[in-house]
Image (spheres, rainbow, N blue to C red):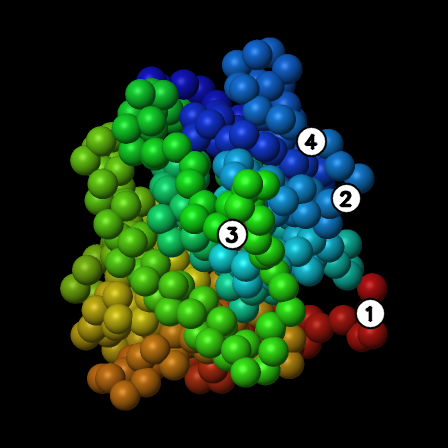
């Protein structure tokens, strides 16, 4: 069914199609419309679900954790400072291997205060043990959300679906919404092998001595690595049902044989694709969409980058005092190969616009000897003195 939907509304519909039994939510821009729309579906009797309004994001994650452990399919969503506030519980959810899904409507982290999009919030949780999938457009956001529930429950790991705030959450467009029958055929009823049962008492999250802690962490790491093949397989299975795929782990677009590549996460991919058509005189690049950031798809990335002379990593986050977050992992993955020159740019921070003419300027800037990491569209003499 093709409908004109705001991104947040589409995400709410996608979640509802997965038949969650508990949704816990606290509002924060730009995520609020997602849970508002879910709440309306529940209030209108269109979704049989316990919708729990809580007093903070920490509580939202805690309710979802408890619900999933008790045997219910659970969901929550948040952004920015909300993600950081619930981070204690997000580490618990991952470490306990509890299957659930949350949407991160990506937004910059304070300070200075910003309500606009970048990826600093999700990147701050990159080592929490959650699977992280990034969506290039709202159709991918719908399809990835549905895939995420099955992925989480097959691996018994939580999945974070990352969607650019405002750029996607507040954009109205025509979208294909799958039928309930199609989703039911793809997603079986919720099952958690260690779900709490009063007739067979057990504990989840007990103290682990140093003799066993490493084993628990190694098991978690191994499960995440198993996710690499599962992400690809589930994307292919969803394509068989709907005719649509989201690109698996890494997807190559643009000019596949180009010697210069641009790697991105999220919605900026669409901007670069449009820019390549607008600026036909500029050399075409191999556009590489990194869909899975955790687990990190090193082998798939090496295949996507084969034959490149230069790889530009164009990301909406960075590590202060370090440089590009994604770029660092890309360099590690490509090390020891016929490695291209890797140039790292932080762009679009705090929602700064990335216009179409960013593409030719990016290609030009990458050719300059300006160091491994730079802030795109910012000259050293433009840096402010002191803070804001």
x and y, in percent, of residue 176 in the image: 35, 25
| Farthest residue, direction left | 257
- 166 or 181, which lies in front? 181
Q: Rounded to the nearest whole Å, what is the CA distance between mark 4 and mark 2?
A: 11 Å
| 4 or 2: mark nearer the eye | 4
Q: Rounded to the nearest whole Å, what is the CA distance between mark 3 and mark 2?
A: 21 Å
x and y, in percent, of residue 182 in the image: 29, 25
Quadrant showing the N terminus: top left
Q: Residue 59 carries which label?
A: none
Q: Is mark 3 on a helix, strand or loop?
A: loop
In the displayed structure, 327 sits above or below 138; it is below
The residue positioned 31% from the left and 75% from the top of the image is 310
- 301 or 161, which lies in front? 161
- Is disc 1 in contact with disc 2, using a CB cutoff of under 8 Å? no
Pointer 4: what residue?
52
| Farthest residue, direction front | 199
Q: Residue 187 sits in which quadrant? A: top left
In primary-sequence order, the first of circles 1 and 2 is 2
Pointer 1: what residue?
387
Residue 385 in view in this figure: yes
Q: What element carries label 1?
A: loop
Q: Rounded to the nearest whole Å, what is the CA distance between mark 4 and mark 3?
A: 19 Å
| 4 or 3: mark nearer the eye | 3
Q: Rounded to the nearest whole Å, what is the CA distance between mark 4 and mark 1?
A: 39 Å
């Amino acid at each position: 069914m093709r409908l004109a939907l705001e991104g947040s509304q589409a995400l709410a519909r996608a979640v509802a199609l997965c038949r969650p039994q508990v949704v816990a939510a606290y509002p924060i821009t730009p995520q609020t419309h997602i849970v508002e729309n879910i709440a309306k579906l529940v209030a209108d009797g269109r979704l049989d679900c316990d919708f729990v309004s809580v007093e903070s994001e920490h509580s939202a994650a805690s309710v979802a954790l408890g619900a999933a452990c008790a045997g219910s399919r659970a969901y929550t969503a948040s952004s920015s400072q909300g993600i950081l506030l619930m981070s204690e519980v997000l580490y618990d959810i991952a470490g306990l291997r509890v299957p659930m899904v949350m949407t991160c409507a990506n937004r910059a982290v304070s300070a200075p205060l910003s309500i606009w999009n970048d990826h600093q919030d999700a990147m701050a949780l990159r080592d929490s043990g959650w699977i992280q999938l990034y969506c290039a457009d709202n159709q991918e956001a719908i399809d990835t959300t549905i895939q995420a529930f099955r992925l989480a429950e097959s691996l018994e790991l939580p999945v974070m679906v990352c969607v650019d705030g405002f750029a996607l959450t507040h954009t109205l467009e025509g979208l294909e919404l799958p039928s309930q029958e199609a989703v039911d055929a793809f997603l079986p009823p919720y099952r958690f092998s260690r779900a709490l049962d009063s007739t067979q008492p057990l504990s989840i999250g007990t103290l682990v001595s140093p003799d066993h802690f490493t084993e628990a962490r190694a098991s978690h790491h191994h499960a995440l690595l198993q996710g690499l093949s599962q992400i690809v397989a589930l994307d292919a299975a969803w394509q068989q049902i709907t005719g649509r795929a989201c690109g698996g782990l890494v997807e190559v677009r643009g000019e596949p044989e180009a010697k210069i590549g641009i790697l991105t996460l999220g919605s900026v991919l669409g901007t670069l694709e449009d820019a390549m058509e607008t600026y036909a005189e500029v050399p075409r690049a191999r556009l590489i969409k990194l869909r899975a950031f955790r687990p990190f798809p090193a082998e798939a990335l090496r295949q996507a980058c084969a034959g490149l002379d230069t790889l530009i990593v164009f990301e909406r986050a960075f590590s202060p005092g370090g440089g590009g977050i994604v770029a660092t992992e890309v360099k590690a993955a490509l090390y020891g190969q016929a490695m291209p020159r890797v140039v790292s740019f932080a762009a679009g921070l705090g929602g700064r616009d990335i216009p179409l003419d960013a593409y030719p300027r990016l290609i030009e800037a990458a050719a300059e000897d300006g160091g491994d990491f730079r802030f795109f569209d910012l000259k050293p003499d433009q840096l402010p003195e002191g803070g804001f």
